[in-house]
Image (cartoon, rainbow, N blue to C red):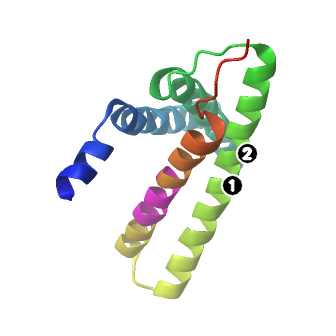
Amino acid sequence: MLKKIWNTCMNYETISYVICGFLTTGVDFVAYGLFRRLELGVGTSQALSWLAAVLFAYVVNKLVVFRNFNLRPSHVAKEAGAFVTGRIVSGVVTWLLMVAMVKLGGDRGFLFELFCKLMSSLVNMVLNYIFSKVWIFRKVPEER
């Protein structure tokens, strides 16, 4: 059973999704740092770095992870809209989960908060993968 789970999870799509996720996180942090160096406020820097990360994630998920090369403008607009919507939904779920876990956990310190952040981030990654696989970049028969 473990071998079946391993074989299901250890494939090009899953591995490339995780790698691209790390790269997306890097884009988010670097962009945030750059915007802060430009002396933009924390909120503005966070919003712009999130936007940069979502745009980067869309491109690498489309082309690298799911190998979807349909670049027709109407298709890209619909797909990108769904991608951003999915990221907003998963972001709200993650935020709610993080706040709830920290609040329910009481004052247990910063390490507990980091644990909650890790758990909510894992939920976020799974939700984003499901949205991308099932809804956004799903394989559809070619139009003729």
Above or below — where is 70 with respect to 61? above
- SS at mark 1? helix
Quarter of the image with the C terminus in it: top right
Is any atom of residue 42 visible in this view? no
Q: Is residue 52 left or right of residue 1?
A: right
Indicate the amino acid at tag 2: Thr
Outermost residue, left side:
3
- SS at mark 2? helix
Depth check: give the residue in front, 29 or 126: 126
Decide whether residue 123 is among the magenta residues: yes
Q: Residue tagged by mark 1?
A: 89
In the picture, the disc for residue 133 is: none
Depth check: give the residue in front, 97 or 51: 97
- At 68% from the left and 13% from the top, the residue drawn is 71
Q: Are marks 2 and 1 in contact (CB under 8 Å)?
A: yes
Above or below — where is 3 with respect to 25? below
- At 55% from the left and 83% from the top, the residue drawn is 103
Depth check: give the residue in front, 51 or 85: 85
Q: Magenta span covers which residues? A: 117-125
- Disc tally is 2
Outermost residue, right side:
74
For disc 1, the neighbor class at 10 Å (few under 14, some 14 to 19, many from 20) is some
Q: Position of residue 119 (x, y in %)?
A: 42, 65
For disc 2, the neighbor class at 10 Å (few under 14, some 14 to 19, many from 20) is some
Secondary structure mostly seen in the magenta stretch: helix
Decide whether residue 122 is among the magenta residues: yes
- At 54% from the left and 40% from the top, the residue drawn is 133
Q: Residue tagged by mark 2?
A: 85
